[in-house]
């Protein structure tokens, strides 16, 4: 074959003569490029459409006024307060548990059957759909424990939902802490716990932060589970036992009942802007972390 | 000192166990609420009953089961080829600079709250189906009719929603294929495209299948997007233009006003959803393990 003769020419061996690229392959490549383009377009059109229609209705009053006549008029002040309140409660519950679990799984756990079950359980929890969490939160927190429709019920339900993400990201970052650091600390006479608190955890803060930010994103975007556990009251919540409405629940109720297209677009835009900020900061933290490692 | 360390280890163990305990609690409470209805109504009657009419105490879940299955299958038909194409694009074809933009974009797609997808579907996809797609279909089938709230609409939006799952996991699987396979294939004279289709994809098969199964789980469990787009008609669908109710959508919509018996029937619906998702999760984790070994 002519290829043999060509080997002596200074050309990469992997390159084939051009004439052999057939049309079928070209079409396949074009299809793949087209699909990639469509995916980008889908993202841009969803975000662009909502923002373009929503931003014109966002002004200062939209953030500072309370919703009037079921949300047809006014702003979303009480809803933002409710969203932040609920997010803080869920993060406050989930963070210590998630970090504790990740520490146990990476630093203490021996690979036995019990640990395997725990890992499988955590994995399973991540796959349960939000409506099931909603049903569970409703029957367990709202009715069985008597917390009613409240920020507490919603926060506890959300905390369970974001737990797997928190555990996974924290675990990943703890695993990247070099063993020599631990050995050094132990050799200096520190106990295992002192080593974890003073050496391992500080080096894994970026990973924990990434997990937290992702958890916040999930909490803000969640709808089904919150509707069934925190209710959909429009008032400003005064205590943790009050019901509330989050932005995503507000978007759903406005859209499904056709109350006001303007307000739906505006609220959805605020929601998307929140999500963009969250994603950006998660990426920034992760990037910084990677650079530090290298 | 030793006791102190032991106490800490126990606390950390409890943290690690909470996720698994939550899975247990969720299972127990969902089954406790839903099983009585399944027993008294009959599992067979519940699953294969064609009428869902809670006011007449008729709880046949077949329409919702078919609704969930049809929307999910539709989403897979659109989303799987797109997802795999994007994964090939990312792992094999795209230059680094494009990957740097494309990957965060896919992540962002995963971060957009499902209610925003639902609202976009309601505001854009549903009208397009009603005014643009229906006339085309009517040319071939004059009897076709639709309000736009349809399986098709739900499937399109769900396809975009499951893309990140399929793309990320498939891409990782493709990247995990040893470089020697690729080298060997190219050295034998295969083109890059032949190498992708005949060597790399077969080698990454289990990972790609896992991604599809997980994407399927996401589609079945999705609530807020589906609820706003599919129209929520509890009828066994006849065509992709028909409006359907899904398992998730029915639970979310009817939970708010359901009486005691109706509520238990919704929990029974939850059991079906739960069992289905669990099966998918177990399939996914066993195929992933096979990848790990191979």
Image (cartoon, coloured by chain):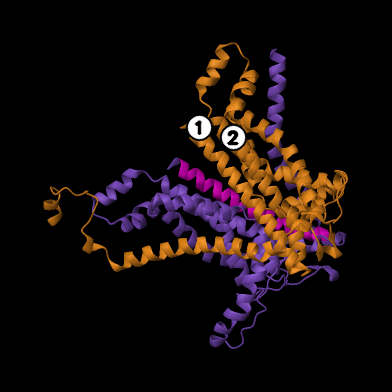
Chain colours: A orange, B purple
Q: Is residue B275 above or below residue A69?
A: above
**Residue at image location 44% in from the left, 51% down from the top:** B99
From mark 2 to mark 1, how far is it between C-alphas?
10 Å
Taken as a whole, is the magenta stretch helix, strand or loop? helix
Q: Name which residue lies at 61% across and 76% down.
A: B129
Q: Secondary structure at mark 1?
A: helix
Q: Which mark is residue A292?
A: 1
Residue at the extreme front: A60
Q: Residues within 10 Å of mark 1 (few under 14, many from 20)?
A: few
Residue range in magenta is B263-292
Sequence-wise, which precedes: disc 2 or disc 1?
A: 2
At 22% from the left and 48% from the top, the residue drawn is A12
Count of marks, rendered view: 2
Q: Is residue A273 above or below residue B122?
A: above
Is the C-beta separation of discs 2 and 1 under 8 Å?
yes
Residue B33 seen in this snapshot: no
Choose top left, top right, bottom left or bottom right for residue A3: bottom left
Letter of the chain that mark 2 sits on in the rendering: A
Extreme left residue here? A5
Based on the picture, tell me whether residue B280 belongs to the magenta stretch. Answer: yes
**Callouts 2 and 1 in the same chain:** yes
Q: Position of residue B97 (x, y in %)?
A: 42, 50
Front one among A59 and A193: A59
Whether residue B5 sits left or right of residue B284 in the image: it is right
| Residue B73 image point, x, y percent | 57, 65
Find disc 2 in the rendering and name its residue.
A206
């Amino acid at each position: 074959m002519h290829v043999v003769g060509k080997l002596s020419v200074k050309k990469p061996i992997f390159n084939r003569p051009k004439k052999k690229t057939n049309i079928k392959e070209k079409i396949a490549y074009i299809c793949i490029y087209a699909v990639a383009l469509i995916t980008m377009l889908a993202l841009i059109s969803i975000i662009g459409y909502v923002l373009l229609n929503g931003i014109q209705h966002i002004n200062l009053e939209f953030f500072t006024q309370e919703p009037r006549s079921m949300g047809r008029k006014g702003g979303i002040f009480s809803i933002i307060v409710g969203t932040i309140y609920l997010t803080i409660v869920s993060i406050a519950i989930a963070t210590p548990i998630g970090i504790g679990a990740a520490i146990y799984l990476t630093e203490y756990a021996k690979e036995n059957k019990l640990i395997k079950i725990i890992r499988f359980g955590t994995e399973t929890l991540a796959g349960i759909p939000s409506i099931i969490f909603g049903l569970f939160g409703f029957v367990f927190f709202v009715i069985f424990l008597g917390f009613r429709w409240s920020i507490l019920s919603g926060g506890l339900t959300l905390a369970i939902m974001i737990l797997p993400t928190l555990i996974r990201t924290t675990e990943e970052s703890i695993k990247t802490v070099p063993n020599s650091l631990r050995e050094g600390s132990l050799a200096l006479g520190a106990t295992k716990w002192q080593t974890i608190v003073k050496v391992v955890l500080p080096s894994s803060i970026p990973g924990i932060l990434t997990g937290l930010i992702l958890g916040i994103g999930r909490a803000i975007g969640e709808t089904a589970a919150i509707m069934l556990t925190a209710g959909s009251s429009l008032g400003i919540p005064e205590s943790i036992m009050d019901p509330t409405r989050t932005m995503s629940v507000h978007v759903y109720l406005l859209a499904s009942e056709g109350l006001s297209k303007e307000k739906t677009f505006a609220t959805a835009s605020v929601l998307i802007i929140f999500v963009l900020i969250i994603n950006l900061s998660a990426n920034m933290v992760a990037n910084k972390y990677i650079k530090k490692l290298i | 000192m030793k006791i102190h360390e032991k106490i800490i280890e126990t606390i950390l163990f409890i943290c690690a166990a909470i996720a698994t305990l939550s899975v247990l609690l969720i299972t127990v409470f969902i089954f406790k609420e839903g099983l009585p209805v399944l027993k008294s109504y009959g599992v067979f009657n519940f699953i294969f009953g064609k009428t869902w009419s809670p006011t007449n105490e008729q709880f046949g879940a077949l329409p919702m089961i078919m609704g969930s299955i049809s929307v999910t299958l539709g989403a897979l038909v659109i989303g799987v080829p797109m997802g795999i194409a994007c994964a090939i694009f990312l792992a094999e074809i795209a230059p680094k600079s494009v990957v740097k933009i494309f990957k965060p974009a896919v992540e962002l797609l995963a971060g957009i709250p499902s209610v925003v997808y639902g609202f976009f579907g309601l505001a854009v996809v549903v009208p397009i189906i009603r005014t643009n797609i229906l006339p085309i279909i009517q040319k071939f089938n004059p009897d076709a009719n639709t309000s736009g709230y349809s399986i098709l609409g739900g499937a399109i939006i769900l396809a975009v929603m499951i893309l990140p799952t399929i793309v990320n996991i498939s891409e990782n699987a493709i990247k995990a294929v040893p470089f020697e396979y690729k080298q060997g294939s190219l050295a034998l004279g295969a083109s890059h495209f032949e190498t992708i289709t005949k060597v790399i994809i077969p080698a990454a098969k289990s990972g790609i299948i896992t991604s599809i199964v997980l994407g399927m789980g996401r589609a079945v469990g999705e609530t807020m997007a589906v609820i706003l787009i599919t129209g929520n008609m509890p009828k066994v669908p006849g065509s992709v233009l028909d409006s359907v109710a899904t398992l998730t959508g029915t639970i979310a919509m009817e939970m708010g006003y359901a009486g005691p018996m109706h509520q238990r029937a919704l929990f029974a619906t939850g059991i079906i959803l739960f069992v289905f998702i669990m099966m998918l999760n177990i399939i996914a984790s066993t195929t992933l393990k096979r990848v790990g070994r191979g």
